Image (cartoon, rainbow, N blue to C red):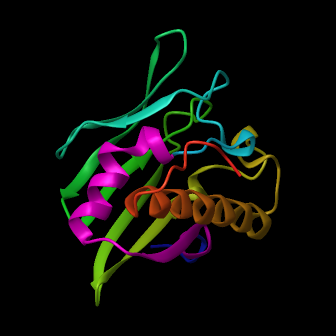
């Protein structure tokens, strides 16, 4: 790993009052219920759509747009229910050699589960790219981290039985 790749990632974690299996299931099979799009981090110019994972290694992570078109965000590299999920992440504006990766870990902590998201590989996307909004790396990473914190909080609400379909 290059020194730059160490800075071009965000790591966000929180605890969920649910089992690792429940937290994993909500993250993957109920993503359409808790995901809250951000105008700053749109996957396609026509976002938002409905996100979904196809279970298992090699499965797709997709966004189905209101017009029915399906955009493949990435592919699942690791699918370990209740433990770990790794998938590639591309926005529609990324060039062929530009991709990031998201790793989600589900670790039991007493009666709760610590859900940790690491979104890495942003060094492949130049600062002047539209997906980065020309923000310096540190500012972009901070904003991306804030968004993932918001997303994980919505996922936690869903896992604990709440309704998180409406953005705050």
* x and y, in percent, of residue 161 in the image: 40, 58
Q: Is residue 38 left or right of residue 149?
A: right
**Residue, far top:** 67
Where residue 44 appears, x then y in whole percent? 61, 28
Count of residue discs: 0
Q: Nearer the viewer, residue 59 or 1?
A: 59
At horizontal 74% and vertical 60% (from top left) the residue drawn is 140
Residue 65 vertical placement versus 3 (above, below): above
In this rendering, the answer to whether 5 lies above or below 96 is below
Is residue 103 shown left or right of residue 21? right
**Magenta highlight range:** 5-34
| Residue 6 among those drawn in magenta | yes
The one nearer the camera, 61 or 131, is 61
Rendered position, 57 above or below 46: below
Q: Residue furthest bottom?
A: 110
Viewer-proximal residue among 120 and 125: 120
Please give the name of the residue rendered at 44% of the width and 38% of the height, measured from the top-left corner.
32
**x and y percent of residue 52 in the render?**
37, 35
Q: Is residue 102 magenta?
A: no
Please give the name of the residue rendered at 28% of the width and 60% of the height, measured from the top-left corner.
Answer: 24
Residue at image x 67%, y 46%?
167
Q: Quadrant of residue 80?
A: bottom left
* The N terminus, quarter of image: bottom left
């Amino acid at each position: 790993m290059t020194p730059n790749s160490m800075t071009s990632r965000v790591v966000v974690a929180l605890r969920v009052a649910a089992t690792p299996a429940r937290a994993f299931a909500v993250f993957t099979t109920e993503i359409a219920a808790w995901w809250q799009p951000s105008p700053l981090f749109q996957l396609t110019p026509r976002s938002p759509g409905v996100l979904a994972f196809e279970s298992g290694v090699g499965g797709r992570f997709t966004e189905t747009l209101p017009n029915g078109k399906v955009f493949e965000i990435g592919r699942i590299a690791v699918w370990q229910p209740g433990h770990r999920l790794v998938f590639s992440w591309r926005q529609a504006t990324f060039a062929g050699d530009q991709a990031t990766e998201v790793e989600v870990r589900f670790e039991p902590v007493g009666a709760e589960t610590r859900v940790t998201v690491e979104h890495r590989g942003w060094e492949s996307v130049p600062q002047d790219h539209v997906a980065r909004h020309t923000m310096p790396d540190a500012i972009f990473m901070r904003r991306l981290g804030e968004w993932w914190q918001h997303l994980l909080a919505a996922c936690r609400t869903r896992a604990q039985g709440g309704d998180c379909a409406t953005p705050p």
